[in-house]
Amino acid sequence: MSNDTEWYPDKYYNVSRWSDGYFAINESGSLIATPSQVNKPPIALDDVVKEMVSQNIELPAVIRFHDILRSQVEILNKSFENVIEEYNYEGRFTGVFPIKVNQMREVVEEIIDAGKPFDYGLEAGSKPELIAALAYNDNRDSLTVLNGYKDHDYLKLALIGTKMGRKMIIVIENVSEVQALIEVVSEMKIKPMIGLRAKLSAKSQGKWASSSGDRAKFGLNVPEILAAIKMFKQHGLHDCIKLFHFHIGSQISDVRVFKDAISEGARIYSKLSKMGIPLEYFDVGGGLAIDYDGSSSKNDSSRNYTVHEYAADIVSSLKGICEEEGVQHPNLVSESGRFITAHHSCVVTQVMDEITPYSDTFDTSAMDSEHSIVKNIRDAEASLNSDNFQEIYNDTCGYREDCYNAFKLGILELEERAKIETIYWRVLRKISQILKNQDVIPEELQTLDDLLAKQYLCNFSVFQSAADVWAIGQVLPIVPLSRLSEEPTETCSLVDITCDSDGKIRQYIDYEDISSPSIKLHKLDKNPYYLGLFLTGAYQDVMGDMHNLFGRLNEVHVFSDSEDESNFYIEEVITGNTAENVLSTMQYNPDYMASKVKRNIDKQIKAGKIAAREGVRLNDFYENCLKSYTYLKV
Ligand SMILES: *Cc1c(COP(=O)(O)O)cnc(C)c1O
């Protein structure tokens, strides 16, 4: 990393560190996507936005790079294939994509298509997901792994899949599912493929630590595994037990956690095999992490390993233990979701306005007969210099305190308070300038820039487009799409357009620390200023909610194309929610609403309060707004 005082285009945004090579900054200061590293030209994101604007696709919007999705599927599968060869491992890798991480049909279709050469399958965790998997995973050589709580219908659907010739693996998550499965099997008269999910004692860490250990929601502990096997045996079904499974949590940032889980899981697997259970698959679940903050560390938002190291650790530990125990190497299954989808989509928003804690416009010049606090704070400002800034800072804070007290007692006039507040913020900004040339910054002034930070108002909803930021404090990389060859000067934080004070982003990736309460951005000018929120393709892409009725975003699906002059084409546009759409989901009837407004306007026309022609126009406007996008119009 270069010297702290020296600026270079990626200094504040760390693109080269979190993007895994999928994004970069070009010479003209634009953020570019490099979806397929091989032979595909880079795509400038501001060009994509330009094209969207020309097609009247309003922001905020989701941009999906399907090439990135395909590339991640290949990387995961090839990493396992290479490692399997490297270690002379005798099983093969047949991974599955967990639908819950991104259920969008286009995403699932693309993953299945890219995964065909590897017999990459799907994982479902609910009835609707299973219904989707039955229709979409039609590769008979790939697995469909079925997790989650299961009722009679779920199990019956699974066995319909078996009858269709698919490799459906029903994973037993808790003891009561054993009996339920036995009943459905006898009703459907077909032998299932059964999986057993173990509750390991190996500890996970991070935000999903509770997915493992004694209090985990899913899985069988060792006594329960043995009991389940006994029950299956009584019904002649123990030879259907084909898969051993565990999932210790998502975003596992420390590779040692995997090693621990594999050693424990591999022992259980081996002992079950030696009991005569014809297990064939060892399923390590998900957890492969994303380096959201670019720190390559054990931080919750990062990971201290590469995908190759992850695969190598699994294969080598599993091989070692199987050989020690004298059992065959099983086929390997993983259920990585976050890794597959996180990079492929981003949210683009436009900064609409800035909110400062201070105002500059009020005239603070001296007048006769003003209160001594006004005079004192003005004198403090006049005497400020690089030797006394700490003392002046303390005095100024004191005067502002005095001002509020005096105001409450009725001693100060509104104009006087306005002057004091204006001068107070001006002094703070001057001190912040002085601090730029200081070697040592006093502790109480270290957060001054965050106090002065501007809030950039962005046209999006945190609740819809960055759900994990709001819910679990996820840190996401945020980068301007252009002007990256210009040093950003403004210390900012971002707020959304919901009427909720929680609708803001409180943590940003930082070039020298884990996270920072503010982000450096460029001064706004008359040109639109676009920001991208990156690595949003896993979970938050589909978990967003309807807070304030903003609803789903417009979406474009972009493919690289070396024949095209801008190096890309928009393959598909999915329009986001209109006001009418979101109101309907909350049980409103838009037609009724339109007719009711019309009747009320008509009444005013009859009463002579609105001219007929104007009334028609007002009514049309209401109806147009019903049919329009829910976000701010630029
Ligand atoms: C959510 C989930 C996954 C996906 O985990 P990632 O960390 O996103 O890879 C895999 N398996 C099961 C059982 C899950 O519940």
Image (spheres, helix red, strand yellow):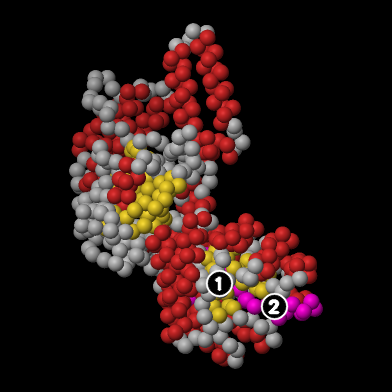
Q: Nearer the viewer, residue 285 or 333?
A: 333
How far apart in space, not on screen, are marks 1 and 2 (Cα)? 17 Å
Which residue occupies 35% across, 62% down? Answer: 35
Indicate if the residue with disc 1 has its beta carbon within 8 Å of ligand 1: no
Residue 388 falls left or right of residue 245 = left
Q: Nearer the viewer, residue 111 or 561?
A: 561
Which residue occupies 24% across, 21% down? Answer: 367
Task: Say which element carries label 1.
Answer: loop
Task: Check disc 1 and give the amino acid type.
Answer: Ser
Locate residue 370: give its quadrant. top left
Q: Is residue 82 above or below residue 618?
A: below
Locate residue 154: give its quadrant. bottom right
Residue 388 falls left or right of residue 95 = left
Q: Residue furthest top?
A: 608
Residue 278, image x and y in percent?
66, 83
- Is residue 92 in sight in this rendering? yes
Whether residue 253 is in magenta: the answer is: yes
- Whichever of callouts 1 and 2 sits on the residue coming sooner in the sequence is 1
Residue 162, image x and y in percent?
66, 69
Residue at label 1? 142
Whether residue 39 is in magenta: the answer is: no
State which region is magenta: 233-257
Q: Nearer the viewer, residue 556 or 455?
A: 556
